[in-house]
């Protein structure tokens, strides 16, 4: 059998497997699942932190591509095609959700004051910014992927970058499975980033 024919059959099988799970269009029907990100170890009520502008950590909202600048959960169908998961939507921008998760994870691991850029634009301290590359479902590997290029700016002006990634394999392309897996992967990335920021 010729290679093009094999590729055609493989693509057809993938399309059948994903039928009813993803959509190329919008649609007015409201989603069954509204997704968010929650920290696995949220800061306890009554916990306090303090610090000067020079010692605090400010978490900026990451930049994103247009693929993630919407409220839908992207599905990478192949190298050039993106669809969206049926019956699922984020409660707010994925980049904003990740910013909140990063900040909460950092607060749980340090007594240093941690703010989000919507709370303070004060100069000084350590700034965590970057680009959210991926936070969605990969149909090719039946995996959930969260990928973040972090950018750390130190008080002396030194800028450092590092890519973080977490993959949760073996996930069915359905909102009830993808949502928890995305939260798991995002928390894994947040822990990695916090260790990098606090590790000096």
Image: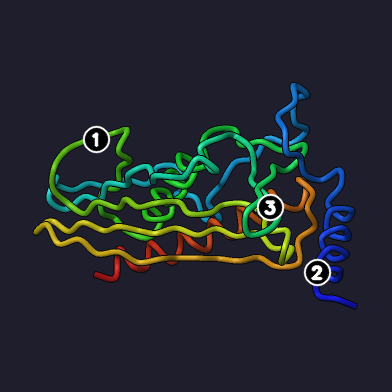
Other residues around mark 2 within 10 Å, as few (<14) / some (14–19) / many (≥20): few
x, y percentage for residue 26? 70, 29
Q: Residue at x 39, y 46 (%)?
A: 62
Q: Residue furthest left?
A: 156
Q: Residue furthest top?
A: 28
Report whether 8 appears left or right of 99: right
Residue closer to the observer: 19 or 111 = 19
Report whether 11 appears left or right of 136: right
Report whether 144 appears left or right of 146: right
Task: Say which quarter of the image contains residue 24.
Answer: top right
Q: Secondary structure at mark 2?
A: helix
Q: CA distance from mark 2 to mark 3?
A: 37 Å
x, y percentage for residue 36? 60, 41
First in residue order: circle 2 vs circle 3: 2
Q: Which residue is mark 1?
A: 120
Q: Residue at x 38, y 62 (%)?
A: 194
Closer mark to the observer between disc 1 and disc 2 = 2
Numbered tag placed on residue 180 in the rendering? 3
Closer mark to the observer between disc 2 and disc 3 = 2
The correct choice, above or below, for 88 with respect to 54 in the image is: above
Q: Which residue is mark 2?
A: 4
Q: CA distance from mark 3 to mark 1?
A: 31 Å
The correct choice, above or below, for 57 with respect to 195 in the image is: above
x, y percentage for residue 27? 75, 26
Q: CA distance from mark 1 to mark 2?
A: 56 Å
Q: Secondary structure at mark 1?
A: loop
């Amino acid at each position: 059998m010729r290679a093009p024919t094999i590729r055609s059959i493989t693509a057809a099988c993938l399309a059948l497997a994903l039928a009813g799970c993803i959509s190329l269009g919008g649609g007015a029907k409201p989603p069954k699942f509204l997704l968010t990100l929650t920290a696995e170890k949220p800061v306890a009520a009554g916990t306090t932190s303090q610090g000067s502008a020079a010692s605090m950590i400010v978490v900026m909202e990451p930049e994103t591509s247009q693929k993630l600048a919407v409220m839908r959960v992207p599905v990478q169908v192949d190298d050039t095609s993106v669809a969206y998961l049926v019956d699922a939507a984020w409660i707010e921008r994925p980049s904003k959700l990740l910013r909140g998760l990063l900040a909460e994870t950092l607060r749980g691991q340090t007594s240093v004051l941690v703010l989000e850029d919507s709370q303070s634009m004060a100069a000084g301290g350590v700034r965590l910014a970057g680009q959210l590359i991926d936070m969605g479902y990969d149909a090719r590997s039946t995996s959930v992927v969260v990928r973040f290029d972090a950018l750390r700016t130190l008080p002396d002006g030194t800028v450092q970058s590092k890519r973080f990634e977490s993959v949760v394999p073996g996930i069915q392309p359905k909102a009830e499975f993808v949502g928890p897996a995305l939260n798991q992967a995002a928390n894994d990335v947040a822990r990695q980033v916090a260790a990098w920021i606090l590790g000096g």
